[in-house]
Amino acid sequence: MSSTKKIAVTPGDGIGPDVSEQAVQVMQAVASRFGLQLELSEHPVGGTAYDLAGTPLPDETLAACKAADAILLGAVGGPKWEPLDFSVRPERGLLKLRSELQLYANLRPAVIYGDLVDASTLKREVVEGTDIMVIRELTGGIYFGQPRGVTTENGERTGRNTLVYSESEIQRIAKVGFETAQKRSNRLTSVDKANVLETTELWRNVVVELSRDYPDVELNHMYVDNAAMQLIRDPKQFDTVVTTNMFGDILSDAAAMLTGSIGMLPSASVGGDIGLYEPVHGSAPDIAGQDKANPLATILSVGMMFRYSFDLTEADELIQKAVVQTIETHRTGDIMSEGKTLVGCQQMGDLVLKALESL
């Protein structure tokens, strides 16, 4: 491992800069503990980049991300930019970044941390012990398929999006699914809609064919509507889930809410040479700059960076322990519960740093 790692920090929009600042502090503290030198650079992305450069992903940002060892992203988007043409909306910047870096696999853990079980809207006995890894295909499917767009046909507007997956695209994401399952409890659920969509019938067939290479992994299949219901009814039946881009987008948010706060959940986008790490939550412009955001998802995303980009599992585990220790006594507003001390974004970051020092 080279002693210096280049990190491109792209804070983005809304609360992105608030949470990124706290995560960078934690990143630096943990890196020095493990003898890792960091070279950090900051670059605009999303709506902020559009305001500066007229594009949600400036060439300079893309070049810096391609030259980095890993990328930390805050959040993109907000109502301010919704009137813009679709091609230059903040989210297109993120989609292009994923595509350019070939980040075809998005890993989203949904874990109940410590006594946060009471923050869940579901009964304790349903969610306690939930630990799910949702693996979402990230660079194909209906979000990227052509043709797409709105045209006028027979005198009326017609919208069109295309769901496309090639065999090789399915194979590579399924491989990530099987290999992740092997590192967990050897159980993989593949989610599709093979009874209605031919594309996902191909998905199922390819996953079954690949399963022969992983005899130690127990594979089962579930239609997406049933998977959504089962996530709420009995989340503990799931361990590792692999699915398409759109289904993964929806199911990972549903899984996130099992934990009580989307502000707690990190994610890793991997596949190419460079990993991109970001919180699952959005840009929450209504609380931006008010010291109210929960930085823990971004801090936990830094943990995933140490694990997946730098092979420092111990660093990830250390960050998780510090987070669990901190939320035993202190909470941001989104996960507040009786008997805890309410803190803001900055203080929460400082408390995690303090917890790290004690571990």
Image (tube, grey):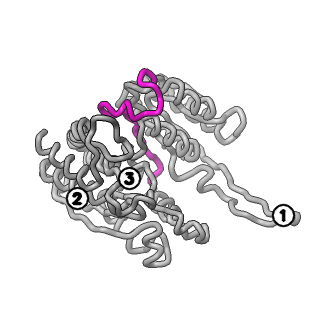
Q: Which residue is mark 1?
A: 156
Q: Which residues are magenta?
A: 103-126
Going by the image, does 269 lie left or right of 115? right
Q: Mark 1: which amino acid? A: Glu
Separation of residues labelled 3 and 1 (CA atoms)? 40 Å
Residue 163 x %, y %: 66, 49
Separation of residues labelled 1 and 2 (CA atoms)? 54 Å
Going by the image, does 25 lie left or right of 54? left
Q: Quadrant of residue 70?
A: bottom left
> Residue 278 got which mark?
3
Residue 283 x %, y %: 44, 58
Badge nearest the viewer, 1 or 2: 1
Going by the image, does 349 lie left or right of 229? left
Secondary structure beneath dot 2 equals strand
Between residues 73 and 165, which one lies in front from this camera angle?
73
Q: Which residue is mark 2?
A: 5
Magenta region includes residue 174: no
Between residues 175 and 329, which one lies in front from this camera angle?
329
Q: Mark 3: which amino acid? A: Glu
Which sits earlier in the primary sequence, circle 3 or circle 1? Answer: 1
